[in-house]
Image: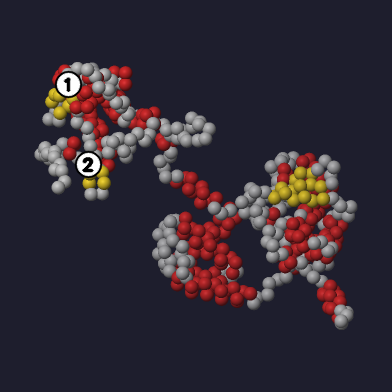
Amino acid sequence: MPPIRNRTRVNRQSYYDSLPENWSVKKLRDELRLKGITQPQNTRHSVLVSLYKQTVTTNEETRTALESRRQETVTPNQDVRTELLGVVKDLTSTVQSLQSSMISLTERVNTMSRPQTSIPAAAGSAEQLRQSGAQTTTSRNDSTPVISGTPRETRETENYTLTTAWADQTSPKPMGVRTTYGYSAESLPYVETISPNLRKQIIEDGQISKTSSRGGQTSHNLSSIPHDDYVEEIKTLWDAAVSQQTARAYSTGIQHLLTFVTLCGIAVPVGTLSDLSEDVLIKFVSYCHYSLSLTFSNIKLYLAGIRFHYLKAGHSNPFKEHDRLDCILRGIKRLQSNVSKPKRFPVTYQILCQMVNRLNGSIFSPFIDFMLSCCSLMAFFGFLRCGEFTVKSRNVDNDFLRMRDVIVQRDKLSYILCLKYSKTDPFRQGVFIHVFNNEHTKPVNIMHEYCQLRISQGAEPNSPLFVDSDGSPLSRNQFISYIRHVMAVLGYDDAKYCGHSFRIGAATSAAEAGIENHLIQTLGRWSSNCYMYVRYIRTDEKVLKEAQEKMCNVKRS
C-alpha cells in the first residue's frame, strides 16, 4: 500500500472581478496599454498589478488637482499665463513621479531576480528570529496584506543578515501552477531578458541606440518621420517613372481619349477616369486608326499612356484580359504592314563630301552654311539620330546641345560630344562620343572654328550649340528643310532624304568599308545583340549582281 500523502488545504478566497489582483495578465496589459504604458512580454503578474495601481492613483491625483484648479475663482487681475504654467508644472511633476515609481519598481524586479546565497545555520532560538522578522500590516486602500519594514526586493547583499534570511525563509514564495499543458507562464520565476539601461530608456521613452558593429551613437528619432503620408514624394516618383518626352506623348493619348468619349456622349467626371469597358476601348482604337490616321506604334503608345494614368489614379489595369482588343490591334498591325513606307535614302560618305564642298560655295548665309557643314559632319561620324542634336520645337528650352557639351582636345586630333540623353539611355546617365580628325573632311578643325565663332558672337557655356539665323535652337523641321534644299541643289531626289539619313549613311559606309559587325554596333550605340543596325544598311544593286555572279563561279567538287 503506497504511503498516504498529506494534502495541504488551499484557503479559497472569494473572487472579486474589480480587484486588479484577480485580473489576467492579458487584461492587465490591455489596461496599461490604454493608459500609454507598455511592458515586456515576460513581466510578472505582480509587477503589472503594482504598476496599474500606481497609474490609477497618479491619474486620480492629477484629475483632483485639475478639478480643484478649475473650481478656483479667477480674479480679473490674475494672469492666465501664470495659471497655465502652474498646470504644466503640476503635470510635469506628476509625470516625473510616475517615471520614478516605474524606475524603482524596475529596480525591485531586478533585485528579485538576483540569485540568493544559502544561509548557514546560526545560534539562537527560532522564536527570537521570528520576533525580529517583518511585521504584517493592512493597507489603507484594500485588504491585501503588505509586508512592512524594509522590502525584500530593495535590500542589498551587504545588508543580508540572519534576521532577513529567516524572514525570507518564513515568507510565502510563489510556486509554479501546474496545468494540463504544463506550468502557467504567469507563475514561473522572472527571467531577465533585457539590460537595465535599455529598460530605463523604454520606460522613459528615450532614444534607443542603433545596433551596429562599430558601436556608434547613431539613433533614430520617430518624431522626425513626416506625417503627410509622403504625398509629394510619391508624386515625384510617379513623374520620374517616365521621361518628359514619354509623358507628353501619354498626355496626348489621354486628350484623344477624352475627346473620343465626349463625341460618343459618355459622361466622364472632371479630373477623374472612369472604368471603360472593352467595347469603348475597341471603338477608341478604331477611331485612332480611321479618323486620326495614327500608326500602330502611336496607338500602342497612347494605350500605354492610358494604362499609366489609370494606375497613377489608383485604378486597376484597364487592359487586363481584353482578348478582343488584342485581336483588333493585331488587325491594325497587319493592315498597316501592307502599306509601303517611303524608303529613306542614306547620306553616304561620297554624298557627304559633295554636301560639304557645295556648302563652302555659299547656298544660304555664311553662318548657316558653316553651321550645316559642322552639324552634318558630326551627325555622320557620330552616328547621331536627328533628335539628338536638334529640338522638336523652338519653345523647348532644355532638350538641346549646349556649348559645354563639346570638348575639343588641345592637340585638335579629336573632340568629345556629351549627350545628356539618347534613345538607348532612358535613365540619362550620359553618353560620350569621340569624333576623330581626318585629312579629307577635317571634322575636328571645323568644330573648333565653329565654337570659336559662336564664342565671338557672345555664346556662353549654357547657350545652344547649333542655332538658326535668329539665335534660337536648331529645330528638326528646319534642319531637314536645309538638307533637302542642299540635296535638290546637288541633283538628288530631296523627298527621299530626312534627318535620319546621316545615321543610315554612316552604317552603310561602314559596311562597305568592311568594318566588323561589333565595331559598327559600338559606333552606332546599338544595344541589341541581334544586329538591328542591319536594317540601316543599304546595299547597291551592283553589289547584289556581283554577289550572284560569284555564286555561279563556285567550283563543283
x, y (%) of residue 485? 78, 62
x, y (%) of residue 79? 26, 19
**Labels 1 and 2: the sequence-earlier one:** 1
Residue at 54% across / 59% down in the picture? 250
Task: Give the amino acid type for the residue marked by disc 2 in the picture.
Answer: Val
Task: Name the element at disc 1.
Answer: helix
Residue beneath disc 1: 126
Residue at 29% across / 26% down in the picture? 118
Determine whether, in the image, residue 4 is placed left or right of residue 97: left
Q: How many marks?
A: 2
Residue beneath disc 2: 177
- The reply to whether residue 200 is visible in this rendering is yes
Which of these two is toward me, 80 or 183? 183
Q: CA distance from mark 1 to mark 2?
A: 30 Å
Q: Quadrant of residue 147?
A: top left
x, y (%) of residue 290? 56, 73
Q: Nearer the viewer, mark 1 or mark 2?
A: 1
Q: How is the image coloured?
A: secondary structure
Task: Give the amino acid type for the residue marked by disc 1 in the picture.
Answer: Ala
Residue at 26% across / 33% down in the picture? 47
Which of these two is toward me, 445 or 101? 101
Q: Taking 414 as reference, is 153 above or below it?
A: above
* Label 1 close to label 2 by CB (< 8 Å): no
Residue 386: assigned label: none
Which of these two is toward me, 296 or 173? 173
